[in-house]
Amino acid sequence: MKNSKIIRFMMIPFVLLAACGCQADGPDTETVPAFRNVTVHDPSVLKTDGMYYVFGSHLASAKSADLIEWTQISSSAVPGNKLIPNVKEEMAEALEWAQSKTFWAPDVIRLGDGRYYMYYCSCKGDRPLSCLGVAVSDNAEGPYKNLGIILKSGKGLSPDGSVYNANVHPNVVDPNVFFDKEGNLWMVYGSYSGGIYILKMDPETGLPLPDQGYGKKLLGGYHARIEGPYIMYSPETEYYYLFLSFGGLDSDGGYNIRVARSRNPDGPYVDSKGQDMSDCRGKPGVLFHDPSIQPYGVKLIGNYQFVNLEEEPESNTVGYLSPGHNSAYYDEETGKYFIFFHIRFKGLGEHHEVRVHQMFMNQDGWPVIAPYRYSGETIGRYKKNDVAGLYKLICHGDDITKEIKTSVPVELGKDGSVSGSCSGRWELSSGNKIEIELEGTVYKGVVLKQWDTDNMQMVFTFTALSDSGTAIWGSKAIIQGRTLN
């Protein structure tokens, strides 16, 4: 379940905040990206009229034109909030049902009538007493007017007339509303409790089509720690990708982002091992049984920290904790993929900020996340001798853990060898496609230049994924003020 505490906004200098990213020649090495950070928990992305918006829990929101400099719009569900100024009166029915004073992760979409539809949700927090509704506005920044509640959970009868059972029925929060490639409208939703569900929606009204109950179950149940579903379609691979957050959202909760894919918006979704995600569920009679769900889904990112090598200048590197509750966006004009998520930081408690990383589809049609936050880079074509060198390697594994995955040194030799903490081979094709074999396991992905926010310099990075769904990242070491070649 989610932590309903409102975390107040705090700015952290970008020089202390590095994440990871992927794509071609980006900003000039003399240009320092002007990162400006915001706090929006559970950020859901909307792009409209050239502006990116993120909407999150507690009616927090922010906007950016370039995904680098962000501006906070709103931060808490109090009177005067720009999205819903008279929140207590406008949303009285939802707050009363959920016995809450705030809201959880919303989603905003623009429908055919040109208006913006906010799918909001509220929850008691210590049990799935929740409601999910929709509000509408002529402006992305509001004010939104409530159209009413469309789903309830936690007590009484379920929409199909059966008595509500939290082991099998959903907690009606965390909506994501999206169009499929045929123009049909869907809503995927759910957190813990009975799992993740999907409903067919009416694109004219923005409401669920009749006689569906809670909809179709995709995965989860028996209070497995799975939440924050988000579905993105890729015209490049013709797959629908279902992103999920496993684990707990707190700094010690082991939150991590996973993905599965399907040819159909309503599944079945499978992971890279070919496992049907409908088999992913908790253990009956045991709350939050992580061992039951850990083998499922492709883990793209968890806790991590790049650690500078002895050969590099001394630098305090940042440890990142509990990345999750993401949204994703494919930009048709540029062909770029982006993933938006909130993340916490080692030593900073529950403070969180929004991060945006670029994504790429690897040779097998799976998304891989660039190691550092997006700074405007675009993937290029590189020479093997330039890519070769000493790297800091992170392996994200497949576990749900509060431990931080720290980097180890590996050398990508100009002769195609890999040595150091791991041994194997590597090769570069098409100028940016990389295939790395480490201790007998093959990883496929891309190489790109990114801004290393720990060391404040452009470096080569790579991001790749194994057939079994293990993600690795690499960041090239900096020696005497420049990256190794």
Image (cartoon, grey):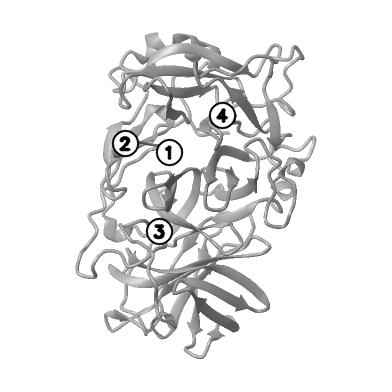
Look at mark 2 in the image and give the residue it sits on.
62
At a point 59% along the width and 30% down the height, the residue shown is 189
Look at mark 1 in the image and give the residue it sits on.
43
Q: Could you say whether the residue bearing mark 2 is in a helix, strand or loop?
A: strand
Look at mark 4 in the image and give the residue it sits on.
184
User: Type of residue at label 1?
Assistant: Pro
Left or right, 468 with respect to 66, comes to: right
Look at mark 3 in the image and give the residue it sits on.
19
Disc with the residue nearer the chain's start (3 vs 1): 3
User: Type of residue at label 2?
Assistant: Ala
Q: Nearer the viewer, mark 3 or mark 4?
A: 4
At a point 63% along the width and 47% down the height, the residue shown is 261
Mark 1 touches mark 4? (CB < 8 Å)? no
Left or right, 209 with respect to 102, comes to: right
x then y, percent, for residue 451:
32, 65
Task: Give the alpha-carbon distance from disc 1 to disc 2, as whole Å.
Answer: 9 Å
Left or right, 79 with respect to 325, comes to: left
Is residue 133 visible in the rendered image? The answer is yes
Task: Give the alpha-carbon distance from disc 2 to disc 3, as whole Å.
Answer: 19 Å
Residue 397 quadrant:
bottom right
User: Are there few (<14), some (14-19), or many (20+) residues within 10 Å of tag 4?
Assistant: few
x then y, percent, for residue 314:
32, 75
Task: Give the alpha-carbon distance from disc 3 to disc 4, as whole Å.
Answer: 35 Å
